[in-house]
Image (tube, rainbow, N blue to C red):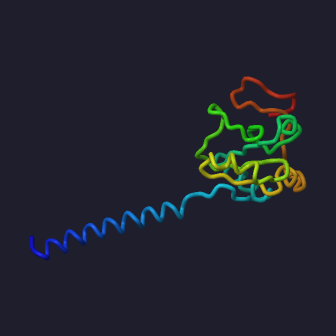
């Protein structure tokens, strides 16, 4: 094997190695970060613009959730994500706690592909005077909350 052939094969190996490293770096840099923050009004506008793109997970106790929650939210008390929970782990998710507690939502956010925390929590939603629902909504249609809920 002459030096032309050797340099050709070395060049091919170097090029493939560089491409592999570049792809790995691009994937690493584009991975979603758990624990991002979104403001209440921005969340409302985002959900209004594309309601099917987002899911809202409320980690407050069920009693608090019944008093009022973001429209379309699913209640998972204290972030206890069961295997049969009615959420999609690969969908953009906003996690809501009472006061925007990042430590409480971060544990659940690690199990999601793209997750954000509502800044200020449900308190910020109420202060912004944004629409809310009350009662419990069961997406499986097996049980519904008190009259007047969706």
Give how far across and how far down residue 88 sits, in percent: 61, 41
User: Hey, which quadrant is residue 18 in on the image?
Assistant: bottom left
Where 8 falls versus 138 (above or below)? Answer: below
Q: Quadrant of the C terminus?
A: top right
Give how far across and how far down residue 132 sits, in percent: 84, 44
Where 27 falls versus 143 (above or below)? Answer: below
User: Hey, which quadrant is residue 117 in on the image?
Assistant: bottom right
Where 30 falls versus 121 (above or below)? Answer: below
The residue positioned farthest toward the top in the image shown = 142
Tell which of 146 and 34 is nearer to you.
34
- Number of marks: 0
The residue positioned farthest toward the left in the image shown = 1
Measuring 14% from the left and 76% from the top, which residue is drawn there? Answer: 4
Left or right: 53 in relation to 75 = left
Tell which of 24 and 129 is nearer to you.
24
Measuring 51% from the left and 61% from the top, which residue is drawn there? Answer: 28
The residue positioned farthest toward the bottom in the image shown = 3
Give how far across and how far down residue 53 sits, in percent: 63, 49
Measuring 55% from the left and 58% from the top, which residue is drawn there? Answer: 31
Give how far across and how far down residue 142 sits, in percent: 72, 23
Left or right: 13 in relation to 76 = left
Q: Quadrant of the N terminus?
A: bottom left
Left or right: 62 in relation to 31 = right
Left or right: 36 in relation to 96 = left
């Amino acid at each position: 094997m002459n030096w032309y052939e050797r340099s050709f094969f070395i060049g091919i190996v170097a090029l493939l190695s560089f491409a592999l490293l570049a792809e790995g770096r691009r994937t690493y840099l584009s991975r979603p970060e758990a624990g991002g923050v979104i403001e209440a009004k921005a969340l409302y506008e985002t959900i209004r613009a594309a309601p099917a793109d987002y899911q809202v997970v409320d980690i407050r106790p069920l009693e608090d959730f019944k008093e009022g929650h973001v429209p379309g939210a699913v209640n998972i008390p204290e972030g206890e994500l069961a295997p049969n929970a009615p959420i999609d782990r690969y969908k953009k998710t906003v996690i809501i706690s009472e006061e925007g507690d990042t430590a409480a939502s971060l544990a659940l956010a690690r199990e999601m592909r793209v997750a954000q925390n509502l800044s200020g929590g449900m308190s910020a939603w109420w202060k912004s005077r944004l629409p809310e629902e009350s009662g419990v909504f069961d997406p499986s249609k097996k049980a519904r909350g008190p009259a007047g809920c969706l």
